Every structure is written in C-alpha cells, then in structure tokens.
Amino acid sequence: MHKAAVIGDYDSIYGFGALGIDVFPVEDKTEAVHQIRRLVKGSYAMIYIVESLAEKIEEELEKYRELISPAIILIPGVVGNTGAGVLGVKNSVEQAIGSDILFS
C-alpha cells in the first residue's frame, strides 16, 4: 500500500500526523536530502515538503520532477508562503492541458 509523507520543520508539519501522514521533521539541508532519498526509494506515493526547505534542496528535487511516483508537492510552512507550491501546480496543469489556469 502506498503512503504519504511530509518533510519540513517540526512546527510546520507536526499536525499532518493526525491525518495519517508520516511526519519527518528535518533541521538542515543534509538531513533533508538524506530523508528525501530514503522516501523516494520507499513505498511513498506522495511526499509533501515545506516550500522553504524545498528551496534549499531544489537541485535534489529536480532529479525526481519527471517521475510519476512519488509526487512531490510543495506546501507553505509556518514562516510564510513563497508561492512556489501554487506555481508548481500551475506549471503542471499548463503542461498537461496546454493552457494557463490562472488568468493574470
């Protein structure tokens, strides 16, 4: 059975455990890269990652961008929203349907 995971600072992700999502708090870039590699090799279909952390390991995440599974989805953390998660969804939809979903 496939599972879902969330990676980020503890304050941003601890509530996801109540939803049945596996929670992996990390404190630095090295720890985050190690954890993402472990989860990608595991049975995780979805990996949520806090936007501020994703910025720090963007090079590592790029390796998995074309994979169907796991889906890596950026979410805002407690320190604020960078807009990277919304932009990622927008770009994916544009690629899939050939049209902008957010009319500026």
Image: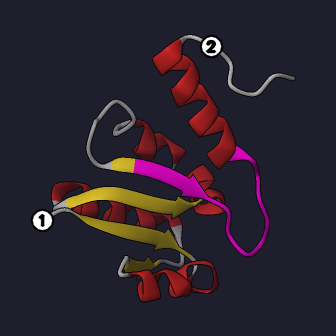
Name the residue: 43% across, 81% down: 19
Name the residue: 44% across, 66% down: 32
Determine which quarter of the picture holds residue 64.
top left
**Amino acid identity at mark 2:** Ser
Answer whether residue 14 is magenta in the image. Answer: no
Magenta segment range?
A: 72-84
Residue occupying the far right of the picture: 104
Q: Position of residue 17 (x, y in %)?
A: 43, 86
Describe residue 97's horizontal placement relative to residue 20 as left or right: right
Dot 1 surroundings within 10 Å: few (below 14), some, or many (20 or more)? few
Residue 1 numbered tag:
1
Dot 2 surroundings within 10 Å: few (below 14), some, or many (20 or more)? few
Q: Position of residue 39 (x, y in %)?
A: 26, 63
Residue occupying the far top of the picture: 98
Tell me if I can see residue 7 in this picture: yes
In this rendered view, identify the residue nearer to me: 82 or 96: 96
In this rendered view, identify the residue nearer to me: 63 or 98: 98
Tell me if I can see residue 37 in this picture: no
Q: Is residue 102 above or below residue 17?
A: above
Q: Position of residue 65 (x, y in %)?
A: 39, 35
Residue carrying label 2: 99
**Amino acid identity at mark 1:** Met
Picture colour scheme: secondary structure
Q: Is residue 30 above or below residue 12?
A: above
Describe residue 16's horizontal placement relative to residue 99 as left or right: left
Q: Is residue 72 above or below residue 103?
A: below
Name the residue: 87% across, 23% down: 104
The local secondary structure at tag 2 comes to: loop
